[in-house]
Amino acid sequence: DCDAGYANWESGWSINKQAWCCEHVGRGCAAPTTSASFDCNAGLQTWAAGWSEPKKAWCCQNIGKGCATPAKTCKLWGDPHIITFDGANPSFYGDGDSWIVKSPTVQIQGRFEGTKYTEGLAATNRIVVSGPFIKNHKIEIGTRESGVLHVDLQPVIKSFPSSYTSMDGSYKLTYDDQGEVPDVIPEGNEKRVFHMDLPLDVHVTVFQWSNYLDVTIQMPAQLGQDGACGNYNGVAADDTTERIMLRVGAEVTGGASYLSGRATIEFTPQMEKMLAAECPESRRVQVRGECTNTLARETAELDLKSCMFNMCFGDNPRARQRAKAYA
């Protein structure tokens, strides 16, 4: 409890409590041993990984920068529903590759593809973690059917259960059957869970089913963060599907993609009928313009329709049930 005894922390707190409270809430941080101050704007974009502990402590105590923030969790499950770090509930039903977490440090992308069980509405099919915080290595996990379980396209996990530690010891991957499932264990599946314990207190857990994935991401906020898991600013209202797509783009452009292979883009007759019947013409005109602006210049019609479907129905958690009416 970093409030208890704070007025007398220097003499009253144990060394362990001082260290924990300093790291997690910016209290109880010892001042630098020299009288020199620090430039708290220099390297601010990557302060968590780049600043020394004395600089973090000084900048946090004196100007409120470089203070550790408690980690929050984002969850993706089903087709795919999301609870963002700020508690919003956007959904991404159209096929394609999307930013899940986009920041200068931590970068996570997901591939959303339809299944025969979801009326063509997408589920999470693949996920890749990369970025400077893991020295731009690429940790990629796909469905059981895909067989994708790679680090830099190399199959470092070759049996179940097993684990792998990076050469420099900065991160650990574990493949087992442990962890609380975000939704339910699908019929006919056995529980297989891929845990990533990564730098910057980032923990990604992937529940690997036959033809889709469920994912939880626990991490502290990063500077400039956004994506399908939201912008982590404490405001749920700005994490709608449409606003997220307008901020980070409707899909990951080819040159920025870390995902192997290419997404399969489909638009089922059910989705076509639902778009025409339940998204008013004026709204379709609006979102078509928004999608055209945010997608690549030479965009195929299927990509455009997938984007429009997200814009029209991304905030409807029961879109799959509605699509069944048009089967």
Image (cartoon, rainbow, N blue to C red):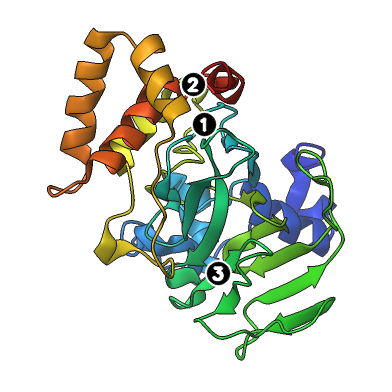
Of callouts 3 and 1, the N-terminal one: 1
Three-letter residue code for mark 1: Ser
Q: Residues within 10 Å of mark 2 (few under 14, many from 20)?
A: some
For label 1, count other residues whose C-alpha is less than 10 Å away and answer few (under 14), some (14-19) or many (20+).
many
Q: Quadrant where the C terminus lies?
A: top right
Which quarter of the rendered picture does the N terminus lie within?
top right
Give how far apart the Cα atoms at labels 3 and 2 are. 28 Å
Q: Which label's residue is closer to the chain start, 3 or 2?
A: 3
Say above or below: 103 vs 90. Answer: below
Point 84% across, 51% down: residue: 188
Q: Nearer the viewer, residue 246 or 65?
A: 246
Q: Residue at x 80, y 63 (%)?
A: 15
Specify few, some or many for label 3: CA neighbours under 10 Å numbering under 14, 14-19, or 20 or more. many
In the rendered view, would you say 274 is above or below 228?
Answer: above
Q: From where the camera sits, is residue 239 visible?
A: no
* Marks 2 and 1 close (CB-CB < 8 Å): yes
Q: Which residue is mark 1?
A: 91
What residue does disc 3 label?
140
The earlier-in-sequence mark between 2 and 1 is: 1
Q: Name the residue that disc number 2 marks.
A: 315
Residue at the image point whose x is 49% and y is 25% from the top: 235
Q: Give x and y (percent) for residue 195.
A: 73, 65
Element marked by disc 2 = loop
Q: Quadrant of residue 198?
A: bottom right
Helix, strand or loop under label 3: strand
In the image, is 25 to the left or to the right of 241? right
